Image (cartoon, rainbow, N blue to C red):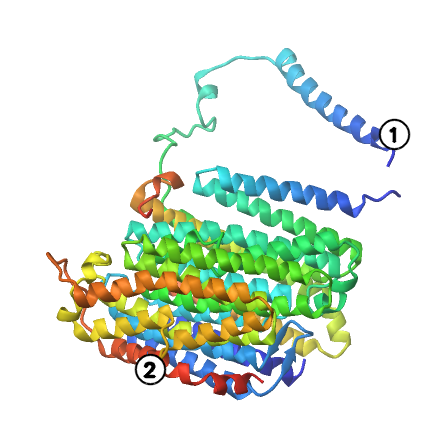
Amino acid sequence: MTPQDYLPLIVMVLTGIAFGAVSIKAHEILGPRRPSKEKESTYESGMQPVKTAHERFSVKYYLVAMLFILFDIEVVFMYPWGVTFQDFFDQGMGTLTLVAMLLFIVTLLFGYIYILKKGALKWD
Amino acid sequence: MSEHDFLAIAPITTVAVFSLIVMLVDALVKKNTSLMQTLSVVGLLGGIGVAIWTLPKSLNGFNGLVAGGGMTNLFDILFCSAGILTVFLAKDYLERLGGHFNEFYTLLLMATSGAMLMAHATDFITLFVGVELMSICFYVLAGFLRRQVRSNEAAIKYFLLGAFASGFLLYGMALIYGTVGGTGYADVAANAATVEMPFIFWAGVALMIVGLAFKVAAFPFHQWAPDVYEGAPTVIAGFMSTAGKAAAFSAFIIFLNSVYGSGVEGTDRVQILLAVLAVGSMFIGNVTAIAQTNVKRMLAYSSVAHAGYMLIGLAAGSPDGSFGIIYYLIAYLFMQLGAFAIVGLLENEKGCNLTFDDYKGLSKRRPGLAMVMAIFMFSLTGIPPFAGFFGKYQLFKAAIGAEMTWLAICGVVASVISVWFYLGLVIAMFFRDSEEKQAEGGTLGGLSTAALAVAVVGTLVIGFLPQAIYDLLS
Amino acid sequence: MHSIPLSYYLILSVIIFLIGSIGVLTRRNAIIIFMCIELMLNAVNLTLVGFSRFSGDQAGQIMVLMVMTVAAAEAAVGLAIVLSLFRNKETVYLDEVNLMKW
């Protein structure tokens, strides 16, 4: 890598910064500004804010978030499985590979039944 | 895949499947506590049975990811026994302290299968998964009495420091992987002698030793142990300090054997490093234990010292050393779990009644318990007819065999220091009178009695079995 | 096509790992300490992928997947522990969590 190779990168970064700065400034100079009470309010659609936003979330929220992380990340194991499944199938090991993945999913299902029966997903 | 693959992991599969069954029973069946207990014990007994069945075989499974048979299965039996004793002790204790949730059994079985996976691992990937499966269950179990701030505190300290140590362990694995070109111990054994970047390889080994030394609570990575053991439920502290330590040592032995066996230059430096860790653990653990007033904390510091004794076996780096560690771990299982069991029995509803002062005059109030506790204390000190003495003897013999006599002498001196607080507790129980009394703990239930009886018999009998276990291993 | 040598990846990952560990040792907020630990794990992931890419061995990438999932499980358990501590103690600062000292 020679320093010249970085030139396009630098040009791109500078263009990006310039574009952002110019459009913000241009909006300020060119755009009309007629402030009114509706426009200043939190939701321009007309919804009235009811109470302060600095409020504690319900614990349920954290619980659902944690469970989401757990069940979401498991898909990571299915990508490599999906990529290599065809190779295994061609070698005549398709059933075995499929059963292996089914075992994994059934184990996850056990976990799902558990949280469902324990009422972790009931919101009220 | 062949039957060899499945035989190699059969003990783990048994316990893991039962952990799932127990979890489903918890979710689907009402009024299930005794059913769950029974299923847990059945699962762990099944694990022992399968481990005994595959013990004579020498198995390698899943392209070198796991091994089975021999020493590994002996570790399986050890973990499952610790699990059974803990299940027996748990109900009385947890009910008394108001934390008897059924998740306990699922988590205990999963932690056991994680520990078993660590012993079976012959690859960094399986080792990592095993370590984390065990540790994550332990984090939750340490905070199991969730309304007690003390238990919360133990959980958060254990969690943050444990995850920190996992980072080091993992970085060590990554560096070794990069230099030897594979994640298997077979790759380490085959390529370590010819690595292109020996500095990175040794950095990796050192980082892995740091990570594993944390898991066994060895000096200078022992600071978490007293806090966690004190705050965690006492039965769990007993399980963590026996099965958890044994699992880390099993991984330690198998990993270091692959390094020693590779013929790479410089293993003597690793031995010196381990010897330094051993000496530090023995002295820091025992000297600090003298200053403790809380019995649980005293046992925690003494467990640091016991990790030090076992590190002597690793530093020796010989088959004798490995045998000494396994033998000591078996003895340690019974005496340490037994001691924690009694501490748990005497603990009252508020989690108090744990200081040396509270133990004064125990022989008058509860002579049986005081007697049994005295046996465990003598055994932990290493006084002859009990198991602890024979365990130490094997370890020191291994050190002398590896021309590290100074290490054996350090071990003996450290044992002498430990007399101070172990016998101090015995003296407090038998020869001191108590002034005013706190509420004493619970009554001795049937299951707890059985567990204590097993621990006492183990402590007494293991001392006479070294030859039998030696034959089993070779 | 010039390629970036392996040592660059390794040096970067060492730097990230050190930032993470210094963060763990100096910060007092449990959540931030946990974020620093995640940083360390990601430094390890970078090392693994770097080695894997340069040696052509796939095992390193598989290990990265394992590390990612385990880190997610750890995050869930860790947040639960922090939450239960906060319910009892109303703090996530570790220097205020000091019942046990000898």
| Helix, strand or loop at mark 1 | helix
The foreground one among A6 and C95 is C95
Residue located 37% across and 41% down the image: A57
- Nearer the camera: disc 1 or disc 2: 2
Q: Is residue C22 above or below residue C65?
A: above
Q: Amino acid at mark 1?
A: Gln
Picture quadrant of residue B345: bottom left
The residue sitting at the left extreme is B436
Give the letter of the chain under mark 2.
B
Q: Is residue B254 left or right of residue A39?
A: right
Which residue corresponds to mark 1? A4
Report the amino acid beneath label 2.
Val
Q: Which residue occupies 70% across, 76% down?
A: A94
Residue B83 in view: no
Q: Residues within 10 Å of mark 2 (few under 14, many from 20)?
A: few
* Residue for badge 2: B457
Which labelled disc corresponds to residue C50? none
Whole-percent x and y of residue B334? Answer: 37, 75
Q: How many marks?
A: 2
Badge 1: residue crowd in 10 Å (few <14, some 14–19, many ≥20): few
In this rendering, the answer to whether B161 lies above or below B247 is above
Residue at (47%, 29%) from the top-left corner? A45
Residue B302 is at least partly visible in this image:
yes
B388 sits left or right of B202 in the view: left
Identify the image quadrant of residue B93: bottom left
On the image, the x and y values in percent for residue B49 come to 47, 86
Residue at horizontal 71%, vertical 43%? C11
Q: Chain of mark 1?
A: A
Q: CA distance from mark 1 to mark 2?
A: 78 Å
Label 2: which secondary element: helix
Q: Position of residue B451 (x, y in %)?
A: 31, 77
